[in-house]
């Protein structure tokens, strides 16, 4: 029993002081003053109780040659610490997730290693080489929830159209990476036209949406210009959703120069004008989802002459959202939670992200008043590439519950999730 918390469930519109009763991994009741005499009680007074947070864009690097950067175990522990109950992994492992065999491998590892719910995307093209489509039907049957060539735009219009037709047939969205990666290191990368290429790819892909009716979810939108195109597509009623990362709505290219390698990311940090446009688009619901693009790299790699692109985010995302979007009034608490729960679930067609009787008991308990300082040395992630180290934040997840089992309690990770009655006794104390 989670007693007396402020229950915020954007899907149903609930925002009230209520009790939540959980039994055998499912939500059994949401009401004022539920009586359940034998229930273990968690006192959630002065806390916010929300659907478990969902991060639809993480790199957990397993299986494959990049497990030294992160594994499903370390990534899922980091997610639980940040209040996430569900993550969706990118397929750019080495080798990439581009077949049903590789999808199965990720999901099999997750069964024993992940303490949060874990889904995976599949590549759009074999080896993410932009030449030959994967077998989308097989991928979907094996459990892929979306397709993406993470880090690379699909340059061929014919190929992206063919992918969209197949994806629409099997009911999954495409998450196109509208990035400049393939220009990296070339002369063109220096000219201004390059700066707009995210927006140009988005514009092209919106035509594909119109022609194929396939849903597109635009990840880590970083430019004001991209938002203009997405807003128009939404006005037209096209099935598009969009996402922003905490680093793109808090940091500018100027900050990137000061921070150094830990702010090197793709898409890059942009101008102050772009940052303002993203915040406005979050407010106006042009951007539906907040996701981290959690991209861990080894410390020595980030400190090298050629630091790889990427910022980690699952342990700081909620604190950044509460401090930089909710407290200044850019987003209401309800809207912020919506963008971290039900909206990502909707864009991927997964049945999560709401507090409803009969749903899996994925729940996050948040202390809005908890002040804390980001310290990368306390992270569960293997990554330390966080540009927010040392930032003072207000608001933090204090408990993460996945399928009715506690995986994080006031910062302590329970791996495997706990059903230890001695621990549960302690939960009758206020958290
Ligand atoms: O910064 C990034 N890092 N952007 C990407 O698209 C890929 C990611 C990674 O895998 O490290």
Image: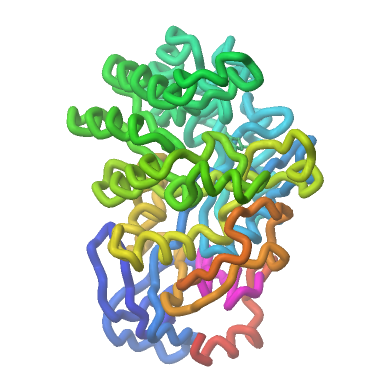
Let me know if residue 73 appears in the view.
Answer: no
Q: Is residue 197 left or right of residue 96?
A: left
Q: Is residue 219 left or right of residue 105?
A: left
Direction left: furthest residue = 236
- Residue 375 is covered by the magenta coloring: no
Quadrant position of ligand 1: top right
Residue 243, image x, y percentages: 40, 42
Residue 113, image x, y percentages: 70, 54
The residue nearer to you, when weighing 52 against 240, is 240
Q: Which residues are magenta?
A: 397-413
The residue nearer to you, when weighing 283 against 307, is 307
Residue 338, image x, y percentages: 33, 56
Instruction: Identify the residue at horizontal 63%, vertical 56% (top origin).
Output: 76
Q: Quadrant of residue 16?
A: bottom left
Instruction: Identify the residue at horizontal 68%, vertical 34% (top origin).
Output: 93
**What secondary structure do most residues of the magenta stretch adopt?**
strand
Query: Which quarter of the image is occupied by the N terminus?
Result: bottom left
The residue nearer to you, when weighing 288 against 408, is 288
Direction top: furthest residue = 158
Rendered position, 327 above or below 263: below
């Amino acid at each position: 029993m989670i007693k007396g918390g402020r229950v915020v469930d954007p899907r149903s519109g609930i925002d009230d002081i209520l009790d939540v009763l959980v039994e055998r991994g499912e939500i059994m009741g949401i009401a004022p003053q539920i009586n359940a005499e034998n229930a273990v009680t968690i006192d959630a007074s002065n806390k916010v109780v929300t659907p478990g947070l969902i991060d639809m864009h993480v790199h957990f690097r397993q299986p494959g040659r990049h497990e030294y950067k992160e594994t499903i175990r370390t990534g899922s522990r980091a997610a639980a610490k940040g209040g996430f109950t569900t993550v969706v992994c990118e397929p750019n492992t080495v080798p990439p997730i581009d077949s049903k065999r590789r999808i199965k491998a990720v999901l099999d590892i997750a069964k024993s290693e992940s303490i949060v719910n874990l889904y995976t995307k599949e590549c759009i093209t074999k080896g993410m080489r932009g030449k030959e489509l994967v077998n989308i039907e097989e991928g979907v049957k094996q459990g892929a929830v979306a397709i993406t060539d993470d880090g690379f735009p699909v340059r061929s219009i014919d190929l992206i159209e063919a992918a969209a037709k197949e994806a629409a047939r099997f009911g999954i969205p495409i998450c196109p990476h509208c990035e400049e990666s393939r220009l990296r290191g070339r002369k063109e990368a220096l000219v201004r036209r390059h700066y707009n290429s995210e927006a140009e790819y988005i514009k092209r892909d919106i035509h594909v949406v119109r022609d194929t009716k396939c849903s597109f979810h635009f990840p880590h939108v970083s430019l004001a210009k991209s938002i203009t195109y997405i807003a128009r597509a939404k006005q037209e009623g096209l099935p598009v959703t969009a996402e922003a990362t905490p680093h793109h709505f808090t940091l500018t290219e100027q900050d990137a120069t000061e921070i150094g390698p830990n702010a090197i990311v793709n898409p890059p940090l942009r101008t102050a004008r772009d940052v303002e446009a993203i915040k406005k688009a979050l407010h106006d619901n042009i951007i539906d989802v907040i996701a981290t693009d959690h991209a861990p790299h080894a410390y020595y790699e980030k400190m090298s002459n050629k630091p790889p692109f990427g910022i980690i985010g699952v342990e700081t995302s909620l604190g950044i959202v509460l401090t930089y979007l909710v407290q200044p009034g850019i987003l209401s608490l309800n809207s912020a939670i919506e963008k971290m729960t039900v909206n990502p679930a909707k864009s991927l067609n997964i049945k999560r992200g709401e507090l409803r009787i009969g749903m899996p008991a994925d729940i996050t308990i948040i202390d809005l008043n908890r002040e804390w300082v980001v310290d990368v040395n306390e992270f569960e992630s293997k990554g330390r590439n966080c540009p927010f180290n040392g930032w003072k934040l207000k608001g933090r997840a204090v408990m993460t519950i996945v399928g009715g089992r506690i995986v994080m309690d006031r910062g302590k990770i329970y791996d495997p999730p706990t059903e230890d009655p001695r621990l549960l006794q302690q939960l009758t104390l206020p958290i």
